Image: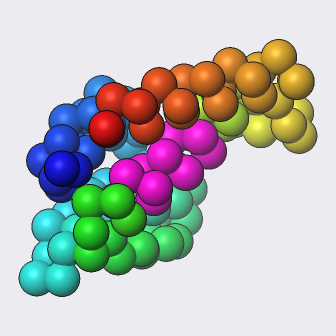
Amino acid sequence: MLTFEKVLEVFRDYLAEDRCCEVVKTSRGYAVLGWDECREIWYSIENASTPEALRDILAECYYSYMAYKVTKGYERDDPTEQEEQEIQKKCRALLERCR
């Protein structure tokens, strides 16, 4: 059975590295917040009321973060096809660890 604790453990290294994604426990589950460092504002808040929702939200955040890294902060528009495949492979590995 998937738990919030398991999801947070699987994504722990990513969350420690990405300074713009933060997970906060709330009375309704967990909130996943996105921080804009340039404007110094929270630009997104998503509620994860189940472990599955938290897993899916963090997988999307991880994907975006990895795309940001490989494009050097979006100096170029998109990851190459090879980079895209590698990012998807890493995402699948994290999702598999959640099982």
Residue at the (31%, 38%) spot, across then down: 98
Magenta segment main secondary structure:
helix
Magenta extent: 54-65
Residue extending farthest to the front is 1
The C terminus - image quarter = top left
The correct choice, above or below, for 36 with respect to 13 in the image is below
From the viewer's perspective, is 17 left or right of 9?
right
Q: Which residue is nearer to you in this view: 98 or 5?
A: 98
Residue 27 in picture, x, y percent from top left: 10, 82
**Colour logic:** rainbow
- Asked whether 64 falls inside the magenta stretch, the response is yes
Q: Percent position (x, y) of residue 91?
A: 54, 33
Q: Nearer the viewer, residue 35 or 63?
A: 63
Q: Is residue 12 above or below residue 45?
A: above
Q: Residue 94 in the image: x percent, y percent?
A: 42, 31
Which residue is pictured at 45% across the width and 58% down the height? 57
Residue 41, percent from left and from top: 46, 70
Residue 75 appears in the picture as rendered: no
Is residue 78 within the magenta segment?
no
